[in-house]
Image (tube, rainbow, N blue to C red):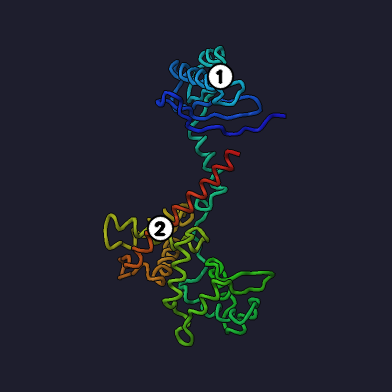
């Protein structure tokens, strides 16, 4: 049975302090020394990896490195059969690889485990966040199914479905066996709700709650990510021209959202931008004046906090992904 590989060191500096080994792996009693080059083979690369091997063997003799046979591998983008044979005569395995393919495979594996690479905004048919207030107000009375919400709130079934979907995207509602109930965050959200004629509008308390939620986890859901993406798009464009043209915002939003191949039609792009621009306006992050978009003072503060939490989330996701790749 072949032993599994384990990583001993990446970018390991040698004792001279000027050279470093790309990768050192262990499999059973064998150490695998890998040196990657993005150029064609040269004799210089062969000499280099043989020097590395000698250095490692010296470390083994001094008990500064685990013992075991050292097998060198030299990876290049181009080599002749004769060069492969020359390396083999020196007990170096010369392998030809395609850097682009390696990076594509890495991205494929990474995207399978890193949420920030997979998530994209979706349109759930709700154009203002305050519209879900009536549905959540009914839920405040206890866990119920959709039919109960429709009857108690005198609401349309389709509207209730959309409102519940968006509320779940913000962690306000949980569903168990077709029965819906407010989460702790949802209870806090409803407590901050205006009653009567203003129930369809977000209050200051609700706005702050949702902004805090988005800033702390911009990859929580497709809706949360969509709000992040529209504000990030405006912020990026503001570095070039301000106020921001709505047409420019649409194009940037499509790119940052990862929807270039999905929002191809003008109608799909316009609807998606309209929806998430409304959400950002509801949260007082962006403002719209005709066909020009501005970032509010709260929006500028928000984007800085958002970028901080986004970076933390990405670093944690990458660390976990790289650990799984190494395993």
User: Where residue 52 is drawn, which disc sits there?
Assistant: none
Query: Eyeballing the image, is 22 above or below 154?
Result: above
Quadrant in which residue 301 is drawn: bottom left
Point 57% across, 76% down: residue: 160
Q: Circle 1 — which element?
A: helix
Quadrant in which residue 164 is drawn: bottom right
Can you identify the residue that label 1 sits on?
61
Can you identify the residue that label 2 sits on?
253
Mark 2 packing: few (<14 Cα in 10 Å), some, or many (20+)?
many
Quadrant in which residue 88 is drawn: top right
- Seen from this angle, which residue lies furthest front? 62
Of pointers 2 and 1, the one earlier in the residue sequence: 1
Mark 1 packing: few (<14 Cα in 10 Å), some, or many (20+)?
few
- Seen from this angle, which residue lies furthest right? 1
Q: Closer to the camera, 217 or 153? A: 217
Query: Eyeballing the image, is 58 above or below 274?
Result: above
Query: Eyeballing the image, is 28 above or below 190?
Result: above
Q: CA distance from mark 2 to mark 1?
A: 59 Å
Foreground disc of the pair 2, 1: 1
Point 46% across, 75% down: residue: 206
Q: Circle 2 — which element?
A: helix
Q: Quadrant of the C terminus?
A: top right
Q: Quadrant of the N terminus?
A: top right
Point 41% across, 26% down: residue: 17
């Amino acid at each position: 049975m072949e032993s599994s590989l384990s990583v001993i060191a990446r970018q390991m500096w040698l004792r001279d302090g000027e050279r470093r080994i790309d990768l050192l792996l262990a499999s059973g009693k064998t150490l695998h020394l890998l040196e990657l080059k993005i150029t064609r083979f040269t004799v210089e690369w062969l000499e280099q990896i043989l020097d590395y091997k000698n250095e490692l063997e010296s470390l083994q003799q001094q008990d500064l490195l685990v013992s075991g046979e050292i097998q060198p591998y030299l990876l290049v983008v181009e080599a002749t059969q004769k060069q492969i044979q020359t390396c083999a005569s020196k007990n170096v395995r010369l392998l030809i690889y395609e850097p682009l393919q390696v990076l594509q495979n890495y991205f494929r594996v990474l995207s399978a485990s890193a949420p920030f690479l997979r998530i994209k905004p979706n349109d759930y048919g709700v154009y203002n966040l305050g519209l879900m207030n009536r549905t959540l107000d009914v839920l405040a009375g206890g866990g119920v199914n959709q039919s109960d919400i429709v009857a108690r709130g005198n609401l349309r079934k389709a509207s209730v479905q959309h409102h519940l979907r968006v509320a779940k995207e913000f962690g306000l509602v949980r569903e168990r066996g077709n029965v819906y109930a407010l989460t702790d965050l949802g209870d806090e959200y409803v407590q901050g709700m205006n009653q009567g004629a203003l129930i369809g509008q977000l209050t200051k308390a609700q706005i702050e709650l949702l902004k805090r939620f988005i800033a702390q986890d911009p990859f929580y859901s497709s809706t949360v990510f969509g709000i992040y993406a529209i504000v990030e798009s405006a912020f990026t464009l503001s570095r070039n021209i301000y106020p921001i043209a709505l047409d420019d915002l649409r194009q940037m939003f499509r790119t940052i959202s990862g929807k270039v191949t999905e929002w191809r039609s003008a109608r799909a792009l316009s609807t998606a931008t309209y929806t998430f621009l409304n959400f950002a306006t509801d949260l007082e992050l962006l403002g719209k004046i005709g066909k020009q978009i501005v970032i509010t003072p709260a929006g500028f503060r928000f984007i800085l906090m958002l970028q901080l939490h986004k970076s933390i989330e990405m670093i944690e996701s990458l660390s976990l992904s790289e650990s799984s790749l190494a395993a």
